[in-house]
Image (tube, helix red, strand yellow):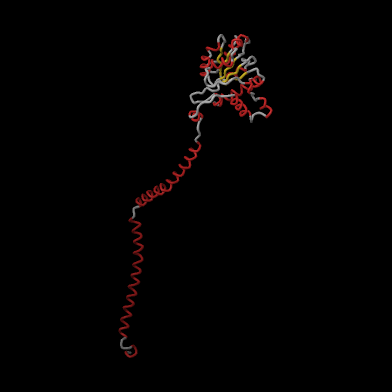
């Protein structure tokens, strides 16, 4: 048997035992390493505090929102601010404050009538509303008071005043923008009117019925008021303009905002209504009424 197995058979037998033991040890090591890894993961999950993890998440979320939201707000602000700057327009006050006032002329009233009725009347009707230069008195060159202006354009006022005897009518009609301006103009008439009777025609603190009674009660030579109230009196047949000789528009005067009578939308519309429905345009075209721009 010794010859068949060789001289060193015993060495092989011992080596085989050692190799088997080494294999068993390797398998045990692998089996022990795997659960150790799993246990470490479990330990990490156990050792971490859930409250701390939630705090970390909460802290991260607002940081991300702030970083993203900040540039969006800035872009929106820029986009909203730019159009506002572009839309800024100069007001009438701003324009007139930097320029010298210019006296009005017949062309100013003519252009106002044409522009207003251009889209409201036919071509034939617009021709009937056209005012020739012969319909106008000399305009105020901004050097006159109301009395000095009227003395210039109405040199025969004393005679005209005596000839007027009709009730519910006037010979001279002065149209302005407000009640306060009406009172100011009546005060300026002192040196011109003489014995003529003056009536204020505005809506503030005065009823239409009261003004109708005053016009019917006696002869009134001069009427001073706003276009809205004058139109109301005409509609109620409290004021008749058949005897009217002079129509004076307080055109050049400006209020605290440097607006003229025709710069206020409501007053402008009422004035144009008065010119049209009161028959003043047709009577001025025929030469019965003269228009003055004060």
In front: 132, or 36?
132
- Locate residue 31, reporting x and y percent: 35, 68
In front: 31, or 276?
276
- Locate residue 216, reporting x and y percent: 61, 11
> Residue 46, located in which quarter of the rendered image?
bottom left
In front: 69, or 40?
69
Quarter of the rendering occupied by the C terminus = top right
> What residue do we see at 48% from left, 40% from top?
82
Query: Which residue, as the protein is rendered here, is positioned at the far bottom?
Result: 3
- Locate residue 169, reporting x and y percent: 62, 13
Quarter of the rendering occupied by the N terminus = bottom left
Taking the image as shown, residue 160 lies to the left or right of residue 99, namely: right
Taking the image as shown, residue 177 lies to the left or right of residue 242, namely: left
Query: Which residue, as the protein is rendered here, is positioned at the far right?
Result: 124
> Residue 129, located in which quarter of the rendered image?
top right
> What residue do we see at 62% from left, 22% from top?
275
- Locate residue 79, reporting x and y percent: 48, 42
66 up-or-down from 259: above or below: below
In front: 180, or 72?
180
> Residue 3, located in which quarter of the rendered image?
bottom left
């Amino acid at each position: 048997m010794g010859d068949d197995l060789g001289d060193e058979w015993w060495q092989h037998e011992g080596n085989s035992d050692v190799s088997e033991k080494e294999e068993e040890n390797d398998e045990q090591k692998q089996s022990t390493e795997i659960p150790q890894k799993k246990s470490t993961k479990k330990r990490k999950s156990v050792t971490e505090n859930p409250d701390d993890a939630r705090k970390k998440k909460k802290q991260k979320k607002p940081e991300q929102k702030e970083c993203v939201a900040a540039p969006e707000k800035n872009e929106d602000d820029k986009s909203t601010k730019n159009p506002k700057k572009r839309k800024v327009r100069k007001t009438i006050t701003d324009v007139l404050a930097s320029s010298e006032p210019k006296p009005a002329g017949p062309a100013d009233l003519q252009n106002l009538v044409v522009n207003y009725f251009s889209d409201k009347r036919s071509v034939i009707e617009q021709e009937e509303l056209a005012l020739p230069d012969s319909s106008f008195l000399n305009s105020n060159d901004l050097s006159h008071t109301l009395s000095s202006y009227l003395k210039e354009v109405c040199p025969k006022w004393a005679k005209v005043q005596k000839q007027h005897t009709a009730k519910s009518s006037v010979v001279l009609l002065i149209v302005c923008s407000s009640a306060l301006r009406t009172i100011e103009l009546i005060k300026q008439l002192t040196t011109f009117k003489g014995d003529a009777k003056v009536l204020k025609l505005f809506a503030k603190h005065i009823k239409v019925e009261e003004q109708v009674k005053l016009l019917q009660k006696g002869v009134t030579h001069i009427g001073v008021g706003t276009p809205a109230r004058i139109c109301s009196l005409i509609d109620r047949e409290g004021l008749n303009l058949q005897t009217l000789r002079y129509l004076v528009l307080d055109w050049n005067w400006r209020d605290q905002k440097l607006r003229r009578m025709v710069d206020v939308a409501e007053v402008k519309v009422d004035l144009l209504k008065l010119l049209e429905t009161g028959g003043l345009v047709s009577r001025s075209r025929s030469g019965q009424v003269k228009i003055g721009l004060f």
